[in-house]
Each structure stands twice: as C-alpha cells, then as structure tokens.
Image (spheres, rainbow, N blue to C red):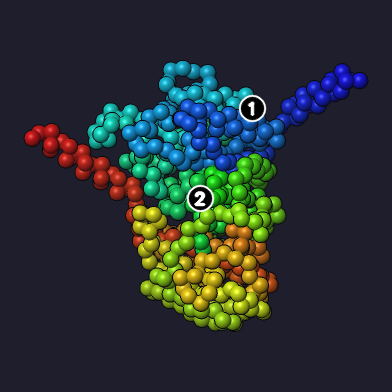
Amino acid sequence: MNQQCVIVYLLLVACTHLSHQKSTPDSSTYVAAVVEYPPIHSTNSSETLRINSDAYVEFIKNASLRNADIIVFPEDGLTTVYLPIREKMEEWTTIIPSASANYIPCSQNTNEVSETLKKISCAARDNNIYVVINIAEKAPCYDVPCPRDKVFYYNSNVVFDRTGKIIARYRKTNLFKEYQFNVTTIPEVVSFYTDFGVKFGTFICFDILFHEPAIELTRNHQVTDFVYPTAWFSEAPFLTAVQTQMGWSFAENVNLLASGYNRPGSGNAGSGIYLGRRGIGKAIMPTAMHKDLLVLEISKINKEAKYNNNYDPMDSSTNQKKVIPFHHGTNQHVFLKHESIKAYQTSSLKGNATETICQNDFCCDFKVEIAKVDPNTKYRLVVFNGDRFYGDVKAGVRTCGIIQCSNDSISSCGSVQESETIFSNIDIMATFHNYKNSLIMPSTLNPDLLPLKNWTFLDHTHNDHIHVNMISNMRTNNLVTFGIYSRNFNKNNANRTSFYTVNYFVILLITLLLSKL
C-alpha cells in the first residue's frame, strides 16, 4: 500500500511539471511573481550572499511550480542594506556582463562573475523562468575620469531569461544616500523583451519619483510593464510604499511588479502587483518580519489603446481584495518617516467645507461633506507647490490633499490611526500646467498603510494643462490621506543626462589640463 502511495505521489509530481504552461506571444495574459523578503545579514559577505541566494532559489522553484513566467526580487535582497564603506565593498560585489555579451553564468566561465550570479542563473535555467535580481556590481575603470580606487560600484538590476542568460543590466540612476555607489555618466534607460510577447522596463526604488529612467520608459519608449526591486523607506502622509507603487502604476497606466525589502522596524516593507488604471492585483504591507510570494495572472496591456488615450478622462476605482492587513492591537509596526507639513498652505477641516487654497500660483478646489466627526482625530486641507528634499536630493512637488492630524497643531499632521470620522463626499480639483513634465498620482491611505477603496480619478487635458479631479462619494472612515501628489520635473534637476554629460566633460578637461602642468 505504501509503495502504491509513493507511485501515485510521483505521478502527481510529474503531472504537475508537465502541466506547466509557459505564456506565449499569443497569450492574452502572463503569470508574474514578486517576493517580499527579509534578507539575513550574517558574519561576512560570502555567508550573507550564500544564505540569501539559497532562499532565492527556493522562491524561484515555488514560483515555477505556480506557473510563473517571471519573478522579481527586492533591492539589496542578496547583500542586505548593511553594506560597508566603499573601501570594503569589493567582496560584496560582482562583475555583471552586459546583455550584449549573451553570457550565461551557469554554464560559461569566461567572465569572473560571482558564485551568487552563477547560482541564480542556474536556478532560472533549471526552473524555466525569467528572474530579476538586484545586486552590488563592480566594474573596473579604464578611462578618465576614474574614481580614486579605479573601480565603479553600482546598485544594479540583473535579468536572466529562461536559459539563465543575462538579458538586461540596469545601474541605478537616482541614489538615496548610497554613498558607496557611483552613477553612470548618462542615465541608463533599460528594457528587455520576453518570449511571451511582453517588453519590460526596469528601475530601482527611488527612481520611481524621477523622469529618468521611469517616465522616459513609459512615455518615450512606450513600455507597458515594469519590474521594480525596492527597499523603500515609507514616509507619511503621501509616500508610503504601497501607496506610491499603486499611485505610479495608476498614473502611468502600466503594470508594475514591485518586490519589497522587508524590515518593518526600520521602515522597509511593501510589495505588490499593480494593474495601472485597473487598480491593485495583489499588495501587502506587513507590520512584522515576513516573507511572501505573490503570484498573479496579468492581462497584457494593449499598447495602442494605452497611448492613444493616455490622458483622456477615466473613471476608475481601485480594487483591493487580496491584501494582508495590519494586526491592530499589537506592538508590531512599520517605522514611518514623517514629512514636515509646516511649509504647506493648510486649513483646518472642522466640518463641511468648500474652499480654494493656493500656494505659489498653484490652486486646489476642495468640496468636502462629513457625515460624522470623531473628536479624537483632526483633519486639514493642504496644498504645496515648491521644492522639498528627499534625503539630500532637491525636487519639485505639487500636492493637494486631506490629511489626518492627531490634534489641532500642524506638527501633528501625518498621523496614522483609526478614525470614526465619516466622509460622505470628497471632490478635489487641481489644474497642472505643462503636465507632460509632471508625474501626477492619486494618493490615498488608510491606517493599514494601504490605499483607500472606492474613489474616482478623472483627468482632462486642454492645450498644455490638465484638469484632475479626485472624487469619493462613498461613506469613508479611517481616512489617513486623500489627494493628488505630483512631481514637477521642471523644478528639479530633471535633465540628469545633460547634467552628467556636462559634469563628465568638465572633469575630463580639468584632468587633461592638470596632466600638462
């Protein structure tokens, strides 16, 4: 009897493998997987990379068994964020051959790639799946100007196809206090094709708030699907992880596969699969150390329909059915950064209101109806038009919204707590001039650090400007944030290509002049 059970089990396993169907160019869908992962930092670099890459292989196997065509892992998921100073980076990094080399680390030895890269390449090949990882890269510098140590270190994404071949490499453009790393002279804009007929773009974490490469890919290269490793530090009230991922996917109307680094106590958490203006496929925002594999069948985007109607009026509501909520009443939480609201133009919201609030020639019209007031939470109407700093990077922002405060003081705004205040109707309208140089996102949040449900985003273009309405006419409690968040690329160093090109030639000229002294 036991022998019969073993035979039946083996047959079932064999049938499972035989039933694995790859998506094809003719398929209307493909299957994607993203990983929320808490990396383990061990005693040294080799042990850290071994432990985490072993975990990756298990995720790859599981994703393949669930018929995934592509799997995405988080930023810093192999090395952890605890990288050493630049002088000690060598042992944490790997050479990454370019896609043009057609290199398969699993079966070729002509390049000195790391054991980690070989292991992931073999896992992609053995499980017949596209794999996207993020890892620290080293690249020898043979030209001037070079860093003092004659090597470039990059925060890089690597994409393997089903044979384990490297088909894309992207080096992060917009670093967030990552002083060990270099950036390329000209920002890289990287995409890759798959055998199931989908072209993907890729970028990393902080890149999502900038024109290069993210907006360059969506608008100039017409890429409809993205793989996005991230180790995001959530900031209330407008830039928590899932809130931002969903907002960007919705704004650009593209599929986004976001894989998050899990370290909630330090502010890192949040992964999801987002479907543009169709809303959220799956998303999680864990409050405790948590690893998870999210798998979803995704409808391919019709490129012509998307780009012919990029800014036509759209009436869309988010649909969140598959999320992991916070567990209220526990001590587990996501550590949050808080943006200072003191630079905003604000108005205290005591009850029903119809107001226009302006700052620096940018105005927002608010119509708010409140059915019930919770005296334990306060709200403000807020507007901002100006520059702010993300870490040490200056950027232009335009924002309209309703945000939660814990008391009447402006310094208490950005609080995240449950509220019994019930909003029966909200309508926020703003006009954005020169909208083609802006990223305009819906921005909503509840106490679980997940987007609110049941809202509508309408946009209508006229000449060089766009009118945007954010509307909720459903009874809504537990509101933390409701509004429109826009990055204004005209007000920051948007053209990094020109900046780095000029910078390169200035340094080159100085080097040549010094060499003649």
Amino acid carrying label 2: it is: Ser
Q: Report the front residue among 1 and 301.
A: 1
Quadrant of the image containing the C terminus: top left
Q: Residue at x 40, y 56 (%)?
A: 390
* Residue type, mark 1 in image: Asn
Q: Is residue 305 above or below residue 27?
A: below
| Mark sitting earlier along the chain (1/2) | 1
Query: Residue reaching furthest right?
Result: 1
Instruction: Tell me where residue 251 appears, x and y as whole percent.
Output: 53, 57
Give the residue number, with chain letter if any, for mark 1. 127
* Residue count near mark 2 (Cα–Cα under 10 Å), binned few <14, some 14–19, many ≥20: some
149 left or right of 308? left
The quarter of the picture where residue 481 lies is bottom right
Q: Quadrant of residue 101?
A: top left
Q: Dot 2: what SS?
A: helix
Percent x, y for residue 476?
66, 70
The reply to whether residue 490 is visible in this rendering is: no
Above-or-below relation of 494 to 408:
above
Percent x, y of residue 486:
46, 62
Crowd class of label 1 (few under 14; some 14 to 19; many from 20; radius 10 Å):
many
In percent of the image, x 45 and y 54: which residue is there? 209
Check disc 2 and report the residue beneath it.
266
